[in-house]
Image (spheres, rainbow, N blue to C red):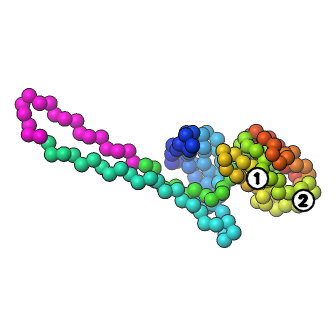
Amino acid sequence: MKKYEYLINGKPFVVEILSFDGRRGDVRVNNVAYSVEVPQGPAAGAPVYATPYPAAPAPVPAAPPPASPARAPEAAPASAPTPPPAVPVPAAAAPAQASSDSMVVAPMPGIILSILVQEGDVVAAGDALLVLEAMKMENEIHASRAGKIKKIHASEGAEVQSGSPLVEFE
């Protein structure tokens, strides 16, 4: 397991990569578990990779002064911390929904920007259902299974909490 600590807009985030096979993975952000997937194909775009900031050069110790019997030895200079290695970050990846077989719920608190389906629509597993804005990012919420939309529990502009029901299947 790899663990990284980031400051994003002054807010601390602890990201733990639990598993990643190059396409799908499980991560934990501030102790909340998510499943992520790197989109494939020309429509989805190529994955984006996080690039760490350049490391500060290692300090070069100066030549020690001539030793004198009354002088104590000097402490060695501390080296600069090195940044974490590059981690693949999926482009526009949305956290996995904590959903039942018939209900899709909000994976995090946010605001519903747009609803992409209507009651009665038939959708395939993975189809986008709505767009949720959370932490200044737009997250597409996808169907967990194929089926017919029975009820839409959210409305555009509505503020939802984590676990709030969004879309119900028949």
In the image, the segment drawn in magenta is 65-82
The disc placed on residue 131 is 1
Residue at 61% of width from left, 39% of height from top? 31
Q: Amino acid at mark 1?
A: Val
The image quarter in which residue 126 lies: bottom right
Compared with 102, 77 (above or below) is above
Circle 1 SS class: strand
The image quarter in which residue 70 lies: top left
Whether residue 156 is visible, yes or no, is yes
Q: Residue furthest left?
A: 69
Disc nearer the start of the sequence (2/1): 2
Residue 93 or residue 112, whichever sits in front? 112
Whether residue 143 is visible, yes or no, is no
Residue 130 percent location from the top left of the image? 79, 53
Q: Is residue 34 left or right of residue 83?
A: right
Dominant SS in magenta: loop
Residue 9 percent location from the top left of the image? 57, 43
Indicate whether residue 79 is drawn in magenta: yes
Q: Amino acid at mark 2?
A: Asp
Residue 116 percent location from the top left of the image? 82, 57
Dot 2 and dot 1 residues touching (CB under 8 Å): no
Q: Is residue 21 left or right of residue 58?
A: right
Q: Residue furthest bottom?
A: 42
